[in-house]
């Protein structure tokens, strides 16, 4: 596994973990970018976060909608299971026990 792949998988897990801690399991891409930077040390661009949200949505781990320039993501039950280590999706790092 390359370093870039490891960072991407960890960033996706970080996004899911943050969503699991937010009211309604929902946050916008700008807040998610700031949270994964402050909490998990991922210095990601807004484009990277939006791309990750789209990828997570394709996997059924989040739902997303766009209003103007704002992308909202909401964790699905499957996304919550992946964040909690109860399910695994290739492309998302497994959380440590």
Image (cartoon, helix red, strand yellow):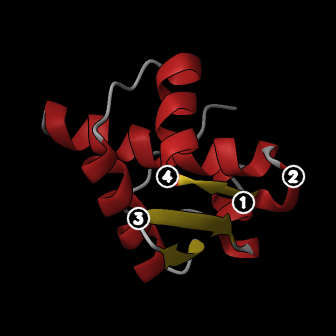
Give the residue drawn at x 41%, y 81%. 58
The residue at 46%/23% (across/down) is: 37
Closer to us: 84 or 42: 42
When asked about the image quadrant of residue 54, the answer is bottom left
Location of mark 1 (residue): 26
* Residue 49 percent coordinates (x, y): 37, 50
State if disc 4 and disc 1 touch (CB < 8 Å).
no
Which is in the foreground here, disc 2 or disc 3? 3
**2 and 1 marks in contact (CB < 8 Å):** yes
Q: Which of 61 and 81 is in front in this view?
A: 61
Q: Residue 56, relative to residue 6: is it above or below?
A: below
Q: Is mark 3 on a helix, strand or loop?
A: loop
Q: Which residue: 44% across, 49% down?
A: 12
Q: Which of 15 and 7 is in front in this view?
A: 15
Q: Residue furthest front?
A: 68
Quadrant location of residue 11?
A: top left
Local packing at callout 3 (Cα closer than 10 Å; few below 14, some 14-19, many 20+) is few
* Mark before the other along the chain sequence, 3 or 1: 1
Label 4 – label 3 distance at C-alpha: 10 Å
The residue under label 4 is: 29
Is residue 91 visible in the rendered structure shown here? no
Q: Is residue 80 left or right of residue 94?
A: right
In the image, residue 77 lies at what x, y percent? 76, 73
Q: Residues within 10 Å of mark 1 (few under 14, many from 20)?
A: many
Task: Name the mark on residue 23.
Answer: 2
Instruction: Tell me whether the residue at label 2 lies in contact with that at label 4, contact meaning CB atoms closer than 8 angstroms.
Output: no
| Residue labelled with disc 3 | 69
**For numbered disc 2, what is the local secondary structure?**
helix
């Amino acid at each position: 596994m390359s370093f870039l792949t490891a960072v991407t998988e960890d960033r996706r897990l970080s996004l899911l973990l943050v969503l699991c801690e937010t009211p309604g399991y929902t946050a916008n891409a700008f807040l998610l970018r700031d949270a994964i930077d402050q909490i998990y040390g991922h210095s990601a661009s807004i484009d990277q976060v939006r791309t990750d949200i789209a990828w997570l949505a394709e996997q059924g781990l989040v739902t997303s909608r766009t209003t103007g320039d704002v992308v909202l993501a909401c964790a699905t039950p499957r996304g919550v299971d992946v964040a909690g280590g109860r399910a695994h999706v290739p492309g998302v790092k497994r959380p440590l026990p």
